[in-house]
């Protein structure tokens, strides 16, 4: 099981072993179980695999945690080319800026669970005609399968 929620205005993801991934929204960096990650590389900590890619001065994070593939996008302004999209291949959970521009990114990545963040996330939901009530936390307990995308509106 993975749980998604806001902790001190930053996005937190916690697994069954209480290992935590924190995404610092303002700094656009990740803290993986206490280890600050802000450089492109491949990492492994607490049974969580992480690959960080840098494109056009933006970092993108791809995790494998609890057999779930999670991608965090720190920007919605990068080129959607084959090389960049190959990094996002086979995504279960997509965490991205909640902007109108991010809708095009989501449509090209095809994640099973989408969590937009930021002040403009209502624009993202409205553009996709998704009217989701805000929740304090979301627990991913099920297998991600099929062609249906679920959208989650986390409140701070």
Image: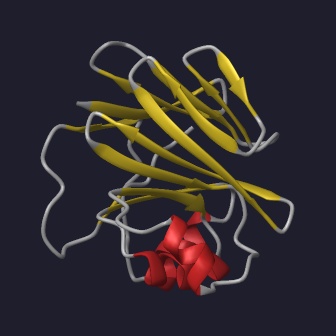
Quadrant of the drawing holding the C terminus: top right
x then y, percent, for residue 64: 39, 41
Vertical placement of residue 34 versus 31, above or below = above
Q: Nearer the viewer, residue 57 or 93?
A: 57
Asked which quadrant contains residue 40, the reply is top right
x then y, percent, for residue 152: 37, 55
Using residue 67 as the reference point, say whether residue 134 is left or right of it.
right
Q: Residue at x 78, y 40 (%)?
A: 39
Asked which quadrant contains residue 85, the reply is bottom right
State the residue lying farthest toward the right. Answer: 57
Q: Residue at x 44, y 75 (%)?
A: 109
x then y, percent, for residue 44: 51, 27
x then y, percent, for residue 99: 65, 72
Vertical placement of residue 115 versus 34, above or below = below
Vertical placement of residue 62 versus 8, above or below = below
Q: Nearer the viewer, residue 84 or 100?
A: 84
Vertical placement of residue 109 versus 32, above or below = below
Quadrant of the drawing holding the N terminus: top left
The number of discs equals 0
Using residue 73 as the reference point, say whether residue 133 is left or right of it.
left
State the residue lying farthest toward the front. Answer: 42
What scheme was used to colour the molecule? secondary structure
Q: Residue at x 31, y 13 (%)?
A: 17
Q: Residue at x 69, y 57 (%)?
A: 119
Using residue 53 as the reference point, say whether residue 137 is left or right of it.
left
């Amino acid at each position: 099981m993975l749980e998604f929620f806001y902790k001190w205005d930053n996005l937190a993801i916690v697994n069954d072993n209480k290992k935590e991934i924190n995404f610092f929204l303002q700094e656009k960096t990740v803290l993986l179980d206490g280890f600050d990650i802000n450089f492109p590389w491949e990492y492994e900590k607490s049974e969580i695999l992480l690959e960080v890619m840098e494109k056009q001065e933006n970092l993108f994070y791809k995790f494998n945690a609890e057999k779930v593939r999670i991608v965090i996008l720190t920007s919605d302004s990068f080129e959607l080319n084959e090389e960049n999209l190959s990094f996002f291949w086979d995504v279960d959970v997509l965490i991205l800026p909640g902007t109108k521009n991010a809708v095009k990114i989501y449509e090209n990545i095809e994640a099973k669970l989408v969590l937009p963040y930021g002040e403009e996330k209502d624009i993202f939901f409205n553009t996709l005609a998704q009217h989701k009530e805000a929740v304090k936390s979301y627990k991913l307990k099920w297998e991600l399968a099929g062609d249906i995308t679920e959208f989650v509106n986390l409140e701070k």
